[in-house]
Image (cartoon, rainbow, N blue to C red):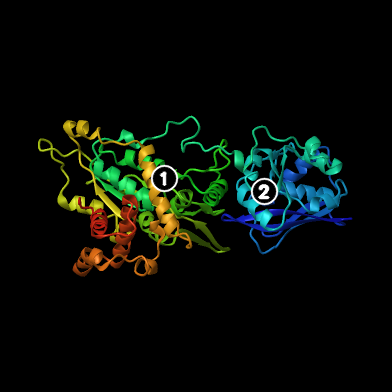
Amino acid sequence: MTVARTRCVALVGVTGHLVEVEADIGSGVAGLHLIGMLDTALSEARDRVRSALVNSRCAWPDARITVSLFPASLPKRGSMFDVAIALALLAAAGFVPAAKVAEPFFLGELGLDGTVRPVRGVLPAVLAAVAAGARTVVVPVGNAAEAGLVPDVTVIPATSLSHLVGWLRDGDPAGGLPIPAGGRGPGATRSLPPGGSGAAVPDLGDVAGQPLARRALEVCAAGGHNLWMLGPPGTGKTMLAERLPTLLPDLVPDQALEVTAIHSVAGTLPGDRPLLSRPPFVAPHHTATVASVIGGGSGAVRPGAVSLAHRGVLFLDEAPEFPMTVLDALRQPLESGQVTISRALGSVTFPARFMLVLAANRCPCARPSTPGDPCGCTPAARRRYLSRLSGPLLDRVDVKVTLYRSTRRELLADRRFIEPSRVVAERVLLARERAAKRFAHTPWRCNAEMPTGALHGEYRPAPSAMSPLLQHLDSGRLSARGLDRVLRLAWTVADLGGKDRPELRETTSALGLWLGEER
């Protein structure tokens, strides 16, 4: 038999597509020819595969070898196909049984010495393989714990090509392929803090002197709302943003798999955490480009910061320092919950439903302004600085808070009212459970996801509660989009207060949070 087939997966964004790898050994000038719309990394597989086979004591056929990756019209990138190409070639040469390589999916990169090295995107690739009917998936031993998160599939960890060949010849996985130490399935996955197993977890109890900002943080966590904090340096804006994830509940299983798949494709999945069960926190530097924040790249399209923050928090510190192109590019994913990147060969869509937190100083110099040492920035300079945050962007921010410097007396007095993250997180969880019960038969998870039709239909507050909102709408202080966001806020305030529907007090409080006024 000169033609053999096996299977692999091609990733387009975070979506996997079935790829059949066919190898044919025929007459002609000796050499390995790869076809099927390949990128540079995949075209280089011919050299990696040849060296891996020779160094694994496998005979290299002295013939013309053609390897086809079907469908040919699907772009294929990366080195994940190395193992599948090598085994299809060996099966075509009769070195391993062709029937044994036809059913499993093979994922992994080959080293020149024949070792099977970890690759990105194993979790979404295994999910796609299971959707295509796979019962067995062979992955690098370094990706075994990640692949083990997918149910209803047998995961075979591979350390080297020679061990893999021995398993295919003998049919004994335990003898040919050792089980990785520490590998565990989804039921045994530990939930670790965002910073890692040894990192100190931030706590809301560390923030003193900003009771209004702490309340705003609780409201945002309970409803999934966006936040803007304005104030001089040293008032706790960054501390507050870093503590927002500690108030959020754990990700539910389907959200955890979705978030983990994105980080797997991006190559940012921690080695000690095959499953991300906590909401991510992403804080790009203000020099970040549009491609790094939104996603893209000159070669393979990679998820950006907005997708890495999916189901978590995206924090832009010193937000006016970001390029306006980056800030304005956030508007579309804030509305749709996803970002689509178009290239000549097609479009890639990444999920991007995140909570946006913006922090800004009052002026570009960021000096503390006191009566004895006033800031030297002119009013025009301050307006220019803050105008980099466009009106349409701020219109998509639900909660706006102004922070002030606290005196020593205020700091000492406020410590009696500070609550740790654990206490606030319990109230947030209760509020989210109330919302989840209300949305039990809908696709929405929190108040921030309610569509406009529902806000002005089944979930519209009573006319008496709508009165202040309609007055601001008539005066022009509130846009139609702003009205929707205030209504979502009002539902969150009602959930935190244990009420079934927002009343006048809740809508007035929500309006104050949206306008940035203390009420």
On screen, residue 112 versus residue 340, left or right, reads right
Q: Nearer the viewer, mark 1 or mark 2?
A: 1
Give left or right: position of 7 versus 243: right
What is the three-letter code of the residue carrying label 1?
Leu
Q: Is residue 225 above or below residue 147?
A: below
SS class of the residue under badge 1?
Answer: loop
Specify the label residue 506 is tagged with: none
Quadrant of residue 181 within the rendered picture: top right
Please count the marks in the image.
Answer: 2
| Image quadrant where residue 57 sits | top right
Q: Quadrant of the N terminus?
A: bottom right
Q: Amino acid at mark 2?
A: Met
First in residue order: circle 1 vs circle 2: 2
Please give the residue where the numbered disc 2 appears in the rendered image: 80
Label 2 sits on a secondary structure element that is loop
Quarter occupied by residue 49: top right
Residue 515, given in percent of the width and then of the height, sits at: 23, 56
**Residue 314 is at least partly visible in this image:** no
To which residue does mark 1 refer?
248
